[in-house]
Amino acid sequence: MMTTFPYKDSAQALQFALGYFDRLQADADIRATWLKLRAIVQLKMRDPDIQAYVDTRSGTQMQVRAGVAAEPPNVVISLTADVFHQIYTGQLNVIMAFATGKIKTRGNTGLVMRTTWTLPAAIRIYREYLKEIGVKEEKGSKKIKIPTRQSTVSGERPMRLKERFLHGERQVCIERARYLTESYRQTEGQPAALRQARALRHILNHLTMNIAPDELLVGGLTGKSLAAAVYPECAGQRILGELPTLETRQDNPFHIGPEERRELEEMLLYWRGKTLEDYARSAWPPQVADYYDKIAPFILTEIGGIAHQLLNHEKVLQLGLEKIVAEARQRRGSAAGEQADFYEAVEEACIGVIEWAGRYAAEAGRQAQIEVDPQRRIELERIAKVCQRVPAMPARTLQEALQTVLFVHYAAQMESYVSAISPGRIDQFLHPYYAADLAAGRLDRRAARELLECFYLKLSESLPLFDSDATVAFSGLTSWANTVIGGTDANGLDATNDFSYLALEAMERMRTPQPNFGVRLHANTPPEFRNRVCQAVAGGIGNLQIFNDEAVIGAMIERNIPLAEARTYGIIGCVEPAVPGCSFTSSDAALFNMGLCLELALNNGCGRIVTEPIGPATGDPRSFASMDDVVEAYRRQVAYLVSLMIDGLEGLARVHAAHKPTPFVSAFTDDCLAQGKDVTAGGARYNFTGPQGVGTATVGDSLAAIDQLVFREKRVTMEELLRALDDDFEGQEPLRQLLINHAPKYGNDDDRADAWARLAAEIYCQEVGKYPTYRGGRYQPGLYSVTMHIVFGLLVGATPDGRHARTTLSQGVSPAHGRDQHGPTAALRSASKLNQRLVGNGLALNQRINPKGLAGPQGAGILDGLLGGYLALGGMQLQWEIVDRATLLAAQERPEEYRDLVVRVAGYSALFTDLSRAVQDEMINRMEHEI
Amino acid sequence: MEAKPGLIFDVQRFSLHDGPGIRTVVFFKGCPLRCRWCQNPEGLLPFPEIAFQAERCINARACVRACPCDAIVYPAEKDDGAPNTAKRIRRAACDRCGLCAAACPSGALRVVGRYYSVDELSAEVLRDQPFYRASGGGVTASGGEAMLQTKFLIAFFRRCKEHGIHTALETCGQVGWERLVGVLPYCDLVLFDVKAIDPARHRQLTGYENTLILDNLCRLVADGIQIIPRIPLIPTLTTTPQNLDDIALFLQSLGLTAVHLLPYHRLGEDKIHRLDSPLLPLSLPDLSLDEVSMIANRFRQAGLTPISLHGS
């Protein structure tokens, strides 16, 4: 029996309700949440009848008044007094009340939903209020049951956490920077490895503990619940000038308090001359520095920190960090010099992480003691126990395993950088703990899924702090924490398991921007799993990508990785394959502008936007006699600029090894301990550096147009073409239309164009593949663009494919916008013709399909057919965006209503509303295939 | 023996409504009927035509220079510089040589209809074979009326079968039985249009009575080939209760169960203006979802299994 509202008289009831609202206002969280609504919320209660409204339009005042608002409210909530009472005494779940029509709303219901995360506090306040005014909760009313872990209703907690994640304010947390700087001031003159390790330990010893309500898994990159850390030693200087506008900028604003801002400005002064960029500049030939500043030919992403690694979670889970510390200590005994420093740094870093977990154990214990809610107390006690054990010792349960992964993940982000520290094959290394829990009856499937959902949210909390340039180039406020499920084991046998399904299910429910979620498929993937994946996509899950084992493993073997290890690949960041646990692939080292190379080839080495010599003088194109000459000029431009990019990256690699080693991740990356070497010095078993080529379709289509119209049909002379490019087709629309409509285009399964796209990419891949790396490996190319195709496009004039100057280049290996006119199968066939074996660092193919045709049971079947065909053709990677243009336009116009819309951007997913305007526009303009 | 080339006006990949799975639909040019609602007016005449799409015209005037017959009409631009949307071709003077289309940079002028050899056409449809395999799809011959080019169709379907591709024929049925019989050995599925049962009404709607059509349908059923009847739902024309009940009764008496419903839409009517077409746009209101589902129910009550295509 549920209890009922204590008053029958309207006047009394109103007084009671207003008194309650006053108390709600006094709670800082609740007040802040309501103020953010900036709206009028009208409440209509029945039996007894009460009308009241809350007005927060000013954003600074929360007015609670009796009666009906004079101006039209943004939302009206109607419910009976009993339902009101039952919700605020915690007897009735508010979502259920909505679902069953016990609460009715008119207007913007989303506004109400945004306040529900404060409900636990509101309930507490309501019950205190009842007690205070002497209203007894009736005897015989259902006591709040303390549920066992097994019967926790999954769905509620993760959704509450997600609400907080979506609507919480993004802040800057300066603690990492503060403690790093403190430590660095104290360790001047010591070996770099030790300075790094000591700084990490110092940070972890001081970072504010943060256990949010409802959390089952704890930790974080910062001391705040939704904040970005600052990396003053990397690209932190770049944010310095932008600190004053950080809060008000249009894309991805961050809150930073004035005190913190001052402190940060002061810290950043200490780092002047000591950042990676400063060191790199002195290591580079002058020309590299010059080109680095111009951005046009390439950007060297490594300048922000390398990160980008598949961590060896399996090892930490199985051994625990204490064993690793012991091994390092033992090895130090017989080592000297740099090696001894390395081992000492490994110990120090690992101990720092163990101590950090210990602090969390203590904090959880402390909170448990003062917690009034008995259920939450049990949860906090469990958290304390888990943190006491891991990651120092081997994990035994799923919760311990997930907590281990998080601690290690955050610490790696803290040590190196936030980008693309990737958990990898979670269904493989977590399955044993899940299975053990099930077998022992510690957990049921639902509770396991709830933990996993909390895990996804925790991964999503790590935000990057970019300056305004990087905000466009790497749009979406994502940390690119990649996980893949499915695939094969080292013997080539199918490795799909129950946890793969569970991980997919959790992602389907949560739709969080992290992890960047992928599925490995191969010939023997169970059809029901493939179909399940297609169902998820057809259902509109916005963040899922597909990898074809055959193609990925083929490309890895091409790079001399043994078959057995290649079969166990995971994915880093966006789309970059690597062997987990033993690779250091710096997989997003740089991005390279292939579109510019074509421009230089057609302009004797000069740019049209950056109007100065950039590449070698490859001759006046008017003198080119055939396509061979055009291609040769392009090849020489690519070769020259690639060699400069490699110079830049080699300089950076040395700088990383000398100034920013990462002893913590080296502690468990094979074979660093055996070799006594940091990953940045080449301690990993497999070393690569991966720069990506951008503009495959733009260059391919341009070459195809020159071939078709200038050399074959002779409808256009080179002179006419070049003049039109110089003038950005001003007054030459007929010529531009001719280039668009009368020349073949990549993405239509037309070999006349696809062959040129293949060649354009191949030339880049071959040039990159020539070079060995500082760390003892090879350079390996990728073909994806993050969102740099927009930035690079700004620096490239008009191109012979009919593209206007300064507009976006093609994205990843996707066809240029609107150029694929023959449906998705033709586009997939075009992409599969690229020489994928050369693309060891992965490629990204986007395809947007209108969700309309995917409704109903046959939708998944259609996707399954598309996917099956693409796999059979040997395509490497694919991601579908199942969202229509109208939705994206609406989301751009009314972001508040679409706060949870997750979209595929380019090999990764993000909240649409976190993308910069330019990227949003670019997505809206993508070709949409109707079914 | 190589068949005479076939005249095709479109090859549409990734089609999902014309038979099972992912399909490539080949549109044959030329049709015996003149259904008033025809969705593919460019498929009616058995020769290549020139189409003009005014929205794409950028006034480059390349067509004027290219035309040897002086058949391009080019009224002065409007004052606001907006593209001139008047018809561009004087059909009486035009000999359909296609030089204007070849010259037109923006694709506003286009030749509709191209001759394919069996080799060319099969190479084109074979491209998507991996997708047919993965989805249980294949090739559908549509139109126009594919049966008008019987010899080419037989040669083409025979080639498809040699490659193990599922074949479907979409037909209006207005064709001699002896022709149909020749195709059947190479055809896995027939999508057969049924528009009206009353012969007079049928003539009114399509230009022909339906004696031959219904006779063919009965014979196909007797022959045991897989058939799915398709009923265009054209408001006021084919959706009268009498007509729908007649159709349902007739199909039921033949022992057919599955039936495709094709709700009217106006998309095809835009194309009428681009051509020298005898058709007039119907400009009827779309059928609502409710209306379609009521019609579907009517068929369901008659013991049939209706599937409504094209979304709404």
Image (cartoon, coloured by chain):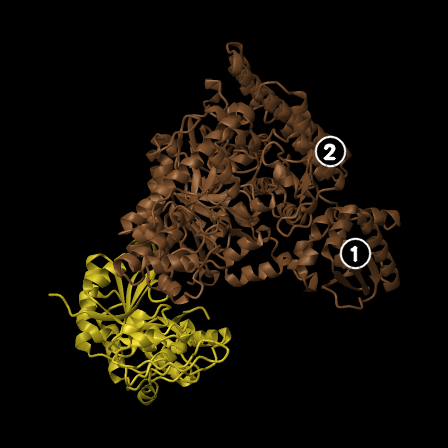
Q: Closest to the observer: A50 or B242?
A: A50
**What is the x, y in percent for residue B267?**
42, 74
Q: Is residue A809 left or right of residue B19?
A: right
| The furthest residue to the top | A334
Q: Amino acid at mark 1?
A: Thr
* Up/down of B99 relative to A327, above or below: below
| The furthest residue to the left | B1
Task: Write the residue at 38% across / 42% down.
Answer: A616
Residue A68 lies in quadrant: bottom right
Residue B244 lies in quadrant: bottom left
Residue B129 lies in quadrant: bottom left
Where does label 1 land, which residue? A4
What is the number of the mark on residue A276? none
Chain with colour brown in the figure: A
- What is chain B's hue in the picture? yellow
Q: Amino acid at mark 2?
A: Ala
Where does label 2 land, which residue? A368
Rate crowding at label 1 as few (under 14), some (14 to 19) or many (20 or more) other CA atoms within 10 Å. some
Q: In front of the other: label 2 or label 1?
A: 2
Disc 1 secondary structure class: loop
Q: CA–CA distance between discs 2 and 1?
A: 31 Å
Q: Is residue A254 left or right of residue A443?
A: right
Rate crowding at label 2 as few (under 14), some (14 to 19) or many (20 or more) other CA atoms within 10 Å. many
